[in-house]
Image (cartoon, rainbow, N blue to C red):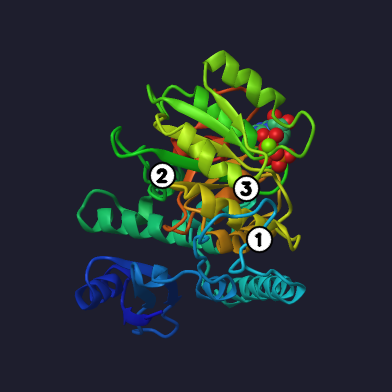
């Protein structure tokens, strides 16, 4: 990552220097203030920045190494056959991920200890609000820095007096900054060919429920002809709820019993504009889970692979699972059970990868009312973002 520091008498001047040098799109990595200690000495501010985008060039090079891209199978696939190119997840790799997780914890602690000039009010108030609601430190810092930077820019153009910014104003800007993390991802227009949307994720994450909510939601696949395919055929009654909702919505559902039935099922449903595919949940920590999933995905050739994770897991576990599922190349993320966590801010820790946009939030069991497609709004609603007393 390309990183450079600029020092000046104020945040504004230091940022101007950075923007003159690197262009307008920069991301602040660190901001340090050195107060004037001697008479006549000036306060100095050092900002450390990176050109925005550089930090995302390849956010997961290690994961790419662990799980190389897979090839589609050549020729027919036998029931139960695993592709030779499937990722092999062994204990060594899992241990490596756990080790990385520990390293990350250490780094977080060092960053906290090393930040010798903490945020000043009201930005400290904003940081504490985020941290208390479970937003990981690095994300809280970045959001509060962006809030500070935005208000400093407004102060510069005469719209606000930065020294008199109230908590309410700062919190309001913080909300805008959170909202900016999420760009609405529209459904591709009709006529763009058949969409094959596959849900993947650990057991009990809410994959099947998400399919029922997507199928019933008025804004998602509005007016499209939908069909559902389920490969979750091993557990008795696994599809009972899904079948009854499909019946109410008059959507055909096909249960695929063998891998080589997948191409046939797709062919039989070729007139449908959208195929929603449900897969069985297994722990990605088990050796068989990811290779088996990879085989199914190679046969389905999805246009979209949605990784479904439940917010009632801890953030470290969520990061670990995200790392593990990189092997099957999900294209979007859905977070369920936001209603079942007291630290909903952790979800923001999953929203910093532009290659894996957070597309859906589910915060209850009601079909489809508990499905939010305006993800930023849904998360902000769950956070205690009020200005309090100034
Ligand atoms: N409170 C709450 N419960 C949810 C939410 N989403 C799903 N559930 C419940 O979680 C349980 C598991 O949901 P499923 O949709 O069956 O999960 P799954 O990922 O398909 O599970 P497997 O197929 O067993 O892997 C069900 O009781 C759902 O009603 C949510 O957003 N909030
Ligand atoms: Mg299921």
Image position of 352 with respect to 302: above or below: below
**CA distance separating discs 3 and 2:** 41 Å
| Residue labelled with disc 1 | 82
| Residue labelled with disc 2 | 179
Seen at 64% across and 23% down, the residue is: 243
Does any portion of residue 178 appear in the rendered image? yes
Q: Residues within 10 Å of mark 2 (few under 14, many from 20)?
A: some
Q: Secondary structure at mark 2?
A: helix
Name the image quarter holding residue 157.
bottom left
Q: Is mark 2 within 8 Å of ligand 1?
A: no
Does any portion of residue 388 appear in the rendered image? no
User: Which label number is shown at residue 296?
Assistant: none
Q: Nearer the viewer, mark 2 or mark 1?
A: 1
Measured as percent of width and height from the top left, residue 357 is found at 45, 51
Q: How many badges with numbers are in the image?
A: 3
Q: Secondary structure at mark 3?
A: helix
Q: Secondary structure at mark 1?
A: loop
Image position of 147 with respect to 108: above or below: above
Q: Residues within 10 Å of mark 3 (few under 14, many from 20)?
A: many
Image position of 44 with respect to 271: above or below: below
Q: Earlier in the sequence, mark 2 or mark 1?
A: 1
| Residue labelled with disc 3 | 259
């Amino acid at each position: 990552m390309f990183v450079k520091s600029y020092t000046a008498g104020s945040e504004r001047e230091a940022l101007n220097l950075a923007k003159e040098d690197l262009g307008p799109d920069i991301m602040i990595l660190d901001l340090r203030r050195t107060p004037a200690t001697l008479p006549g000495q000036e306060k100095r501010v050092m900002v450390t920045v990176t050109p925005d985008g550089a930090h995302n060039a390849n956010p997961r090079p290690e994961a790419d190494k662990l799980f190389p891209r897979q090839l589609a199978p050549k020729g027919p696939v036998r029931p139960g056959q695993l592709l030779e190119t499937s990722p092999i997840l062994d204990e060594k790799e899992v241990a490596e991920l756990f080790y990385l997780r520990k390293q990350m914890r250490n780094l977080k602690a060092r960053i906290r200890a090393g930040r010798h000039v903490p945020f000043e009010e009201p930005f400290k108030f904003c940081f504490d609000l985020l941290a208390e609601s479970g937003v990981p430190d690095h994300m809280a810092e970045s959001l509060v820095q962006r809030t500070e930077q935005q208000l400093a820019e407004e102060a510069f153009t005469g719209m606000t007096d930065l020294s008199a910014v109230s908590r309410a104003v700062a919190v309001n800007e913080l909300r805008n900054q959170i909202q900016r993390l999420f760009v609405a991802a529209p459904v591709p227009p009709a006529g763009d060919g058949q969409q094959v949307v596959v849900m993947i994720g650990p057991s009990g994450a809410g994959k099947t429920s998400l399919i029922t909510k997507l199928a019933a939601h008025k804004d998602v696949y509005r007016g499209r002809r939908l069909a559902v395919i389920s490969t979750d055929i091993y557990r008795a009654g696994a599809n009972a709820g899904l079948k009854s909702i499909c019946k109410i919505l008059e959507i055909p559902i096909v249960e695929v019993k063998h891998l080589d039935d997948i191409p046939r099922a797709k062919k039989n449903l070729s007139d449908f504009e959208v195929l929603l595919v449900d897969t069985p949940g297994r722990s990605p920590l088990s050796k068989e889970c990811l290779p088996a999933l990879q085989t199914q995905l190679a046969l389905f050739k999805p246009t979209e692979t949605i990784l479904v994770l439940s917010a009632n897991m801890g953030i470290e576990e969520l990061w670990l699972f995200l790392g593990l599922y990189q092997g099957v190349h999900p294209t979007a993320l859905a977070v369920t059970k936001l209603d079942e966590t007291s630290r909903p801010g952790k979800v923001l820790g999953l929203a910093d990868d532009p290659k894996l946009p957070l597309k859906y939030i589910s915060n209850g069991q009601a079909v489809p009312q508990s499905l939010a497609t305006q993800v930023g709004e849904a998360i902000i609603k769950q956070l205690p973002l009020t200005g309090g007393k100034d």
